[in-house]
């Protein structure tokens, strides 16, 4: 987890400068990064986002890639880790207007699984609701995590529109994960950071 956080911070530090000066043959040229006056304009200028998140559909922590198809619609794909399993999710977001603060709704599919049986089984998971609500007694004894989840989500994102941090977004999201086989549900949430370029 610490490696992912360090990588994300380094990405932001090295790539967040909004202005670059180029000096060639005595002439100075200044390059301005893409800035915007509204969030929709920023999402139109910067189509791709890469980021990291904690909790929620990521398990404990994970990374994601987002593509702004247009200012209002963006699919996201992500991978995450937990102590007992790995996660994968894909979701589609519908963004609602705002200047810097963007509320959104999303629907998605997630698969949480491990590589098969674990000796000694699994008594507890992190997050705890996986073992408590999504795993059968037989799966716990064998140590198998294999959950197919669908979920609605609601969230809010703060997007920096100009300055040295232009293109950086921070979001908080609430998810209701529904296990497809048992129809058991669990509410969870995540916090994520995304850099749009």
Image (cartoon, helix red, strand yellow):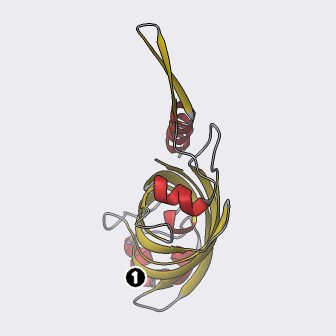
The answer to whether residue 96 shows anywhere in this view is yes
Name the foreground residue: 143 vs 23: 23
Q: Position of residue 29 (x, y in %)?
A: 49, 22
How many numbered dots are placed on residues in this image?
A: 1
- Seen as rendered, the residue at the extreme front is 27
41 vs 133, nearest the viewer: 41
Residue 157 placed where, x, y %? Answer: 63, 63
Per the image, the residue denoted by label 1 is 138
**Frontmost residue, 74 versus 23:** 23
Per the image, label 1 sits on a secondary structure element best described as helix
Q: Is residue 112 above or below residue 195?
A: below
The answer to whether residue 175 shows anywhere in this view is no
Q: Measured along the vertical axis of the image, is residue 180 above or below residue 23?
A: below
The relative height of residue 15 versus residue 197 in the rendered view (above or below) is: above
| Quarter holding residue 114 | bottom left
The quarter of the picture where residue 118 lies is bottom left
Identified at 59% across, 44% down, the residue is 166
Seen as rendered, the residue at the extreme top is 26
Density class for disc 1 (Cα within 10 Å; few <14, some 14-19, many ≥20) is few
Q: Residue at x 50, y 44 (%)?
A: 4
**In the image, residue 95 lies at what x, y percent?**
56, 72
Residue 88: % across, % down = 39, 66
Name the residue at 62% across, 59% down: 38
Tell me the residue at 51%/35% (across/down).
15
Q: Nearer the viewer, residue 34 or 148?
A: 34
């Amino acid at each position: 987890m610490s490696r992912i956080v360090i990588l994300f911070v380094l990405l932001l530090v090295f790539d967040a400068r909004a202005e670059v000066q180029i000096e060639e043959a005595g002439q100075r040229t200044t390059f301005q990064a893409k800035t915007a006056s509204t969030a929709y304009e920023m999402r139109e200028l910067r189509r791709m986002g890469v980021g990291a998140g904690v909790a929620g559909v990521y398990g404990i922590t994970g990374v994601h890639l987002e593509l702004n198809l247009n200012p209002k619609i963006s699919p996201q794909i992500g991978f995450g880790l937990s102590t007992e399993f790995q996660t994968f999710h894909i979701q589609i977001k519908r963004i609602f207007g705002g200047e810097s603060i963007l509320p959104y709704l999303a629907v998605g599919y997630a698969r949480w699984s491990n590589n098969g049986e674990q000796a000694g089984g699994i008594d507890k998971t992190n997050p705890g609701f996986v073992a408590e609500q999504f795993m059968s007694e037989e799966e716990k004894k064998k140590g198998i995590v294999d959950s197919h989840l669908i979920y609605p989500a609601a969230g809010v994102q703060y997007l920096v529109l100009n300055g040295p941090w232009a293109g950086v977004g921070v979001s908080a999201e609430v998810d209701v994960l529904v296990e497809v086989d048992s129809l058991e549900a669990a509410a969870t949430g995540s916090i994520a950071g995304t850099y749009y370029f």
